Image (spheres, rainbow, N blue to C red):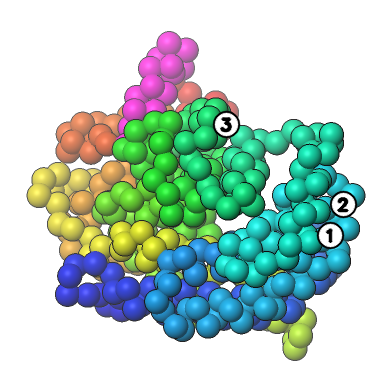
Amino acid sequence: MVGGSASGRWDARDLERRLCKALDVAARAVPVLAVEGYSDVSNPEEVLRPAKVVAETAVLLLAAARATPACKSVLERVANVAQLLRPHAQGDRVRALVCMEPALALDHCMAHVCLTQLGYLDEDLDGLLAQSLTSGAAAARERLPHRELEQHWLRQLHRGSANIRDPDERSLLRRCALCTGLDPFSSSRDDVYAFTHALMYVTDLGSLKPRLPRSQGNIVGDAEAALAQSLAEDDYDLGAEVLLAWPMLGARWTPAATFGFRVLTSVEDEAGFLPALSIRLDRYRALVGEARTRYALASAYHTVYVMGLLCAAALGSGWLPAREVPHASRARGAAARILDIIGSANPPPRWRECFGALDPPQQDCLGPLLMAMGLRQAAASRELRTIKALLEVAVEFGVVGGPAPRHGAELLRRAARLGTTLQGPEL
């Protein structure tokens, strides 16, 4: 398998190779998307703002440079993309926006703040930003908790350090998804993004050990449930973001996380890049030349960046993914029982192919992941009998870890109080 190493951990050279691929995409995306962004006449509601591309590219560069200070191939690419990015991150348009919109000054300067950390200074823009942040209108914007954390992180970076024990940040942490947790049955993509982004900011992209608002085990449990959601939906963008939890928290890669990383790398190796849910192959094939290139970059760049960020986080933390899913020492037969209950979609999601390549004891080791998938699927279709059947298997085989079984039991207790025996969407 590509990525294997004798130590039992993923080969760092393979992670560097994947990170370089992401940076190569950035070198193509910036000239194409950083000026006008992208809008598709066939789907006018989907608009990619150039500022989003610029900011996300800068975050990728910062993470890559921090993670691989001795890797020449990565650092050369970072320097190349940084030069492409500077006119868009530190140019006249950014200065005008910082001047005119002090409540959004840090948003406009995200790329500049990241480039400054990399040594690409602009003292005039720094001074203008500092002046805007003292404006009476600087706080005139209501934000979600994870967006407040983002502002706090940027403000700390602008000052030259990210102090995670700042009292303001501790207050913000108590209101974000890292503290409140995720609903394993009904959390949306936005809910999961709020969780993963909060994690990026409080760890300074994995470079700091935060004082967490809950135990690391509970947060990893939420991440595993969110990973089950993303794998079941072939949502590689979300899956890669969720996997950031392990290296950024300095947590040992669990069997579920190891399997999730294997799924992503297998898809990336087959397609040449990690595809996004939003890309439409019929639309891609209908376009030619520059139009096709713009569409492909606009649709896929973000997922490619997240995969690069994941590789950088693993390299920088030293917590490399495991090479293989371990073999279960107990709960033998659990995987087959769970799969028999939840059935299979048509066409099957990609994880099924990777799962089928594992030995039965390895499959059983993924029982908690399968349980989370099955319970979420049953809850979404309002199939209370299926939830009951899955929980009986969970108790029989001891597959009760993580938040999904607990939430399933709570749901059945509420349904019993309601006195309902209804099945299906009418619930």
What residue is pinned by disc 2?
99
Viewer-proximal residue among 383 and 154? 154
Q: Secondary structure at mark 1?
A: helix
Q: Which residues are magenta?
A: 402-420
Q: Quadrant of residue 216?
A: top left
- Residue at left offset 24%, top offset 31%: 392
Q: Quick one: label 3 or label 1, which is nearer the N terminus?
A: 1
Label 1 sits on residue: 95
Q: Which mark is residue 274?
A: none
Q: Which mark is residue 168?
A: 3
Q: Amino acid at mark 3?
A: Asp
Residue at x 31%, y 78% (from the top left corner):
2
- Cβ atoms under marks 2 and 1 closer than 8 Å: yes
Majority SS type along the magenta span = helix
Residue 369 lies within the magenta run: no
Looking at the image, which residue sits at the far bottom?
Answer: 289
- The answer for how far apart the CA atoms under marks 3 and 1 are is 28 Å
Tell me the element at label 2: helix
- Which callout, 3 or 2, points at the residue further toward the start of the chain? 2
Decide if residue 427 is on the left or right side of residue 339: right
In front of the other: 398 or 238? 238
| Residue 170 in the image, given as x and y percentages of width and height | 51, 31
**Rendering quarter of residue 48:** bottom right
Q: Give the alpha-carbon distance from disc 2 to disc 1, as whole Å.
A: 6 Å
User: Badge 1, how many Cα within 10 Å: few under 14, some, many 20+?
Assistant: some
Task: Indicate whether 250 appears above or below 353.
Answer: above
- Which residue is located at x 85 percent, y 55 percent? 97
Horizontal side, residue 152 vs residue 273: left or right: right
Query: What residue is at 39 percent from the left and 76 percent from the top?
Result: 70
Which quarter of the image is occupied by the C terminus? Answer: top right
Q: Amino acid at mark 1?
A: Arg
